[in-house]
Image (cartoon, grey):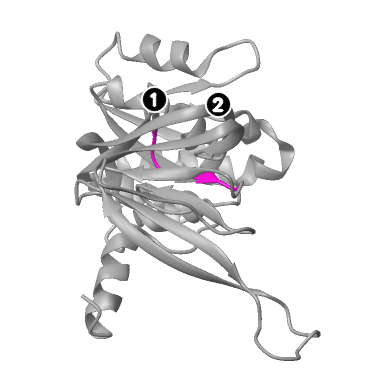
Amino acid sequence: MNPAFAYIYDELCSERRLEKDVSLLETELSRRGIEGRIVRLAMFRQPKDVVFELMRGPVKNLVFVGNDLTLQKMMPFLPDVDVTFGYISLSPPSALAQHLGIPFGAAGVDAVAARLVETLDVGKINDRYFFTEVVAPEMRASLDIEGRYRLQPAEGGAIAIRNLAGTSGKGCSHPQDGKLEAFIQARVEPKGIAFWKKSALSESHIFFTHGTLSSEKAIELFVDGQSIRGNSFSLSVLPRKIRMITGKQKGWEVNSASLVRKGIS
């Protein structure tokens, strides 16, 4: 057993449908010499308590095994932990693994063993960290950008503030540029007599380092897919805040290369 590695299994890893996948994963970890202590999450154990318990030992690399929700529910406290994190997805959805360049299933062990570590930005909303995005689906929210101007989507629109990527898996912002990326959606109705046509969404985006999302009435936001409510939310980015093991084909690098090819960047 390698004391520098520890693995936190989500509850879903105990499901019968994943028995073979877990077995293949553990066999590969052993073959590569990076098998370590395994801790399983359960309803009566708080994820934060599990992580901080492991940090009292010699662990240098903490790998989460499960799906994207496994990593997202850890994010509110992970940036305060001085350790390198990894992630292996055994069950869909796995968009986050794709953005990090981590192959699905036991093949992800190759990335963990290679230990290509990137130091990534983390977003902050009030006193809570986020890794992927904050979404305000209600049109009455407005976004103040660095005290310079205010943006508000028209009726039927929405606001998303990304650090890495949308939870849908579409698009990938750069988590090492020291900025957040705001996407403002507005619904556009078709022109002319075309009652059979559906309205479309136009989208604009802007980069910023801090701002405020607010509404006269309480609104619901989704932070890394988790629901919160309130009237006013401060937003900021913490550059190079978290260390993560990534693969070679990271989503933000692929996206940047695509933009260069198209002459956009």
Residue 152 percent across, percent down from the top left: 48, 52
Q: Is residue 206 visible?
A: yes
Question: Circle 2 is placed at which residue position?
Answer: 230
Rendered view: 16 above or below 79: below
Residue range of the region highlighted in magenta in the rendering: 130-137
Q: In this view of the protein, which residue sits in the foreground, 3 or 103?
A: 103
Tell me the residue at 32%/69% (across/down).
255
- As drawn, the label of residue 214 is none
Q: Earlier along the polypeptide chain: callout 1 or callout 2?
A: 1
**Mark 1 closeness class: few <14, some 14–19, many ≥20 residues within 10 Å:** few
* Left or right of 105 on screen, residue 93: right
Q: Determine whether label 1 and label 2 are within 8 Å by CB.
A: yes
SS at circle 2:
strand
Tell me the residue at 52%/45% (across/down).
135
Question: Circle 1 is placed at which residue position?
Answer: 126
Q: Is residue 134 visible?
A: no
- Please state, as top left, top right, bottom left or bottom right, where the C terminus lies in the image: bottom left
